[in-house]
Image: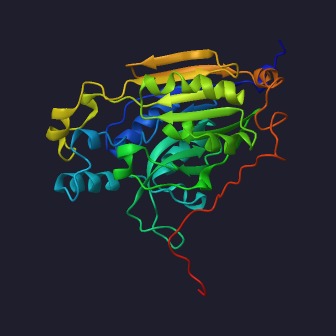
Amino acid sequence: MSASTPSSRLRVAAAQIAPVWLDRAATLAKIERAVHEAADAGAQLVCFGETILPGYPFWLELTDGARFNSAIQKEIHAHYVDQAVRIGAAADGGGDLASLCALAARRRIAIYVGVLERDGGRIGGRSGHSVYCSLVYIGADGVIGSIHRKLMPTYEERLTWAQGDGHGLRTHALGAFTVGGLNCWENWMPLARAALYGQGEDLHVAVWPGNVRNTIDLTRHIARESRSFVISVSGLMRREDIPASTPQAERILAACPPMPADGGTCIAGPDGEWLAAPVAGIETIVYADLDPARVREERQNFDAAGHYSRPDVTQLIVNRERQSPTRFIGD
């Protein structure tokens, strides 16, 4: 087999941590500690799970979340929105992610992190009160490269998250690799995957709230389909991660199993074989050293967006406009 030079290889880290649930400041501090740990271990990219900041909406299935006009659901949702992340433009340092952006630049490490994003409410945006399941890429220069809002929240997620758009379906140069990412069940969407493949993606990041059942099959499938490295990074959630100060904490805890999310973080190579098999039940950081030559080897006989595509027969059109309900003319 061919080999790349050591300088072209990429050390990646997948941080399987639990949030300090629905506490933005405390969870951000925990994420930053994990970034330091990954950087100390020589990682050039560190990834975190879906809406790890400030946490996944586990309360919905535990508290009759679909009950219409429920005072309980209103109270928890209002708290959730308050703890969401406002993301500023690069010029103002990243808003609530400013310290994380500064840390990325200081430690020279790229970051993929799942956040609950609250729209800024500016002209061209939305009301400022809806929230999105967003995957944020921060480059090793500390600049936010993309914010991908989940296209279709799954099942009860639709009771709290708004639908996203194609604006964040983007890839980024990272050393010898081109990296992109999707949220949770978006990874099941063939056209969402194809949108990234068509931009040269050869390192795919799939973020999850955390369960082995979600990552064990799909991670290897995407790797073999795309002939890419795939990092599936999951959160972890235990009953003890729910602060007593959380609205309706007693009600949530009464219905909560010991571990509603057991992890499942794993990394597969472009042949679909494990570099790191799924890890369950513990907070940990999973590492792998990626050789870009392995992508070239596996694409010798299949390249989904290259020599095996037939754009004269089938093409994908992607709308990357940020969607807004208002358009102002004449200002």
**What number of labels is visible?**
0
Q: Quadrant of the N terminus?
A: top right
Residue 5, position in %: x, y? Answer: 82, 20
Residue found 64% across the figure and 44% down from its top: 191
Residue in the image at 49% along x and 24% along y: 265
User: Residue 65: image x %, image y %?
Assistant: 25, 47
| Residue closest to the far front | 313
Residue 43 seen anywhere in this rendered image of the structure: no
Left or right of 330? Residue 3 is: right
In this rendering, position of residue 297 left or right of residue 87: right
Query: Quarter holding the C terminus?
Result: bottom right
- Residue 6 figure quarter: top right
User: In the figure, residue 177 lies in which quadrant?
Assistant: top right
Taking depth in this image into account, of 215 and 292 the one nearest to the observer is 215
Question: Is 123 placed left or right of 68 in the picture?
Answer: right
User: Which residue is painted at 56% across and 77% down in the image?
Assistant: 327
Question: Which color mode does the image show?
Answer: rainbow
Left or right of 228? Residue 34 is left
**Outermost top residue:** 1
- Residue 48 coordinates in the image, percent (x, y): 49, 34
Q: Is residue 222 above or below residue 117?
A: above
- Please tell me which residue is depicted at 56% across the width and 50% down the height of the picture: 148
Q: Nearer the viewer, residue 216 or 191?
A: 191
Point out the residue furthest to the bottom here: 330
Residue 294, relative to residue 163: is it above or below?
Answer: above
Q: Position of residue 160 (x, y in %)?
A: 35, 52
Residue 318 visible in rendering = yes
Q: Nearer the viewer, residue 325 or 79?
A: 325
